[in-house]
Amino acid sequence: MRAMLARAPARLAAAFMGLALLFPGAARPQVVTGDVPKQVDLVVDGDRLVASNVRFSRFDEWKLGARERVKETAIGEAVIVVVTNQHIIAYGVLSGWRSIDREPDEQVESVSAQDYGGLIVTTKRLLNFNGQSGVWGEQDRRPRQ
């Protein structure tokens, strides 16, 4: 009897593994970063940006300018960051679209998005975007004198 009980956890694990092979989607948990589930996605549709807001079951649009072109994007769980040749645009699942102008001769070094936050590093500034409040933060990178 003891030998049978000792093998029970192994048999249960083997049975679960077999079920996982039969139903692979059911065995995997939802992928999240931190505690924020995936709530947004981005569609670039010609001259407009379309945010798919799954949390509120809606689509929110942003119209690009006449000569504005998308250069780079980053999509987090609840925030989107889009860099164009004219603006840095962000979308938060709770705040909607917000933009700031690019400075003359400003080069983008990196763009990232995770959870509710977006981070943009340029040759002139450090920028962050809070997708809950819709507020931009900015820090000058120019040498202090």
Image: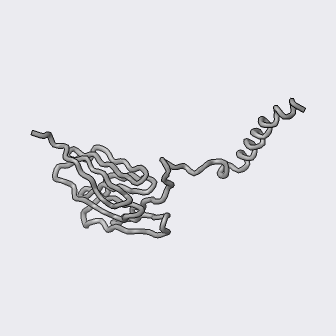
Tell which of 78 and 25 is nearer to you. 78
Tell which of 41 and 117 is nearer to you. 117
Q: Residue 86 lies in what quarter of the image?
A: bottom left
Q: Which of the image's four quarters has the C terminus?
A: top left
Give the side of residue 136 with respect to residue 42, left or right: left
Q: Position of residue 139 (x, y in %)?
A: 22, 48
Q: Can you name the residue that lies furthest to the top here?
A: 3
Q: How many numbered discs, if any?
A: 0
- The residue sitting at 26% across, 66% down in the picture is 65
Indicate the colouring scheme: one colour
Q: Can you name the residue that lies furthest to the right here?
A: 1
Q: Is residue 86 above or below residue 4?
A: below
Q: Is residue 60 above or below residue 8?
A: below
Q: Position of residue 100 (x, y in %)?
A: 24, 59
Give the side of residue 37 with respect to residue 20, left or right: left
- The residue sitting at 40% across, 56% down in the picture is 79
Give the side of residue 119 with respect to residue 2, left or right: left
Q: Residue 16 lies in what quarter of the image?
A: top right
Q: Which of the image's four quarters has the N terminus?
A: top right
Q: Position of residue 134 (x, y in %)?
A: 33, 61
Q: Can you name the residue that lies furthest to the left here?
A: 145
- The residue sitting at 45% across, 64% down in the picture is 52
Q: Position of residue 115 (x, y in %)?
A: 43, 52
